Image (cartoon, rainbow, N blue to C red):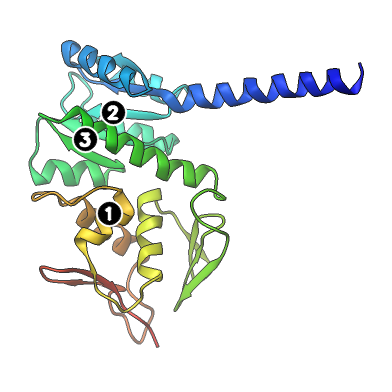
Amino acid sequence: MDQNQRGSVSLVRQNTAEKTILSQTQRILVIDDDVELCQLLANYLAHDGFKATAVHNGNEGVVKALSGDFALVILDLMLPGMDGAEVLSRIRLRSGLPVIMLSARGEDTDRIQGLEGGADDYVPKPFNPRELSARIHSVLRRFSAVQNPAIGSAPGHLVIGDVELDSGSRSVRRGNEIVDVTSVEFDLLEAFFKAPGRVIPREELTRVVLGRELGALDRSIDVHVSNLRRKLGPAPAPDGRERIKAVRSVGYLYVMTS
């Protein structure tokens, strides 16, 4: 095989690999018992470049989600048999696959339950398909940055007190321990570390971290802050203060340590 032939084969393999990656990033799993809604959603997402596959019960949803065939899951909270919260819990035991909760139960407690359970975002029914599509793109961009650290942030270290953030590996350490954070929590901590001691409005955090505008009843960013605060714990003794301070009606700041 001459050099030109080898080059042609290499190019074919590269194009095939790129097509495979593209195909994987376009596949969406919808777990919802509303068959008509699933069909409508599949049709809409197809126009936006996604291929949606629907299943209508929790058990099958878990199996499909863990198959490795999908880039993201849209998960209804109210499902027959195994509910969405349990489905999410089982997925999170084995996978960091992005999950967007989608449910007619729009109460704050339901949103908090989903986000605290590890959902990347939450969209209540009824929803605007364009908004859902925008949320999907935003979550996939964040997840891509986790899988490909060179995309979205240059390697580097940010350190405040005993907490170290590595933008290259997208990892967080507190002292000598790794802190297990989600992609949203990492981006949130990075935003705080780039502006320590400054009050960052909730609107700004929502735009920077979640990639969208803050809605009137949207408490998602607050739940993510709460989860991050819990995982980091208080500053070490003798200080012992909360690392992330809420500023009422404005936003949050990361407290500088001496």
Q: Quadrant of residue 242?
A: bottom left
Please name the residue that numbered disc 1 is placed on.
207
Residue at the spot x=57%, y=50% of the render? 150
Q: Is residue 184 visible?
A: yes
Q: Amino acid at mark 3?
A: Glu
Q: Quadrant of residue 188?
A: bottom left
- Which tag is nearer the camera, tag 3 or tag 2? 3
Placement of the N terminus among the 4 image quadrants: top right
Q: Is residue 85 visible?
A: no
Q: Residue furthest right?
A: 2
Where residue 234 appears, x then y in whole percent?
32, 73
Res. 74 mark: 2
Residue at the spot x=63%, y=24% of the render? 17
Sequence-earlier tag: 1 or 3: 3
Sequence-earlier tag: 3 or 2: 2
Q: Amino acid at mark 2?
A: Ile
Look at the picture and state if 175 lies above or below 137. Answer: below
Residue at the spot x=30%, y=64% of the render? 229
- Gap between marks 1 and 2, in whole Å? 21 Å
Residue at the spot x=30%, y=62% of the render? 230
**Element at label 1:** helix
Where residue 152 appears, x then y in whole percent?
48, 51
Sequence-earlier tag: 1 or 2: 2
- Which tag is nearer the camera, tag 1 or tag 2? 1
CB within 8 Å, label 1 to label 2: no
Please name the residue that numbered disc 3 is placed on.
131
Within 10 Å of disc 1 (Cα), the crowding (few <14, some 14-19, many 20+) is: few
Within 10 Å of disc 3 (Cα), the crowding (few <14, some 14-19, many 20+) is: few
Q: Amino acid at mark 1?
A: Arg
- Gap between marks 1 and 3, in whole Å? 14 Å
**Element at label 3:** helix
CB within 8 Å, label 1 to label 3: no
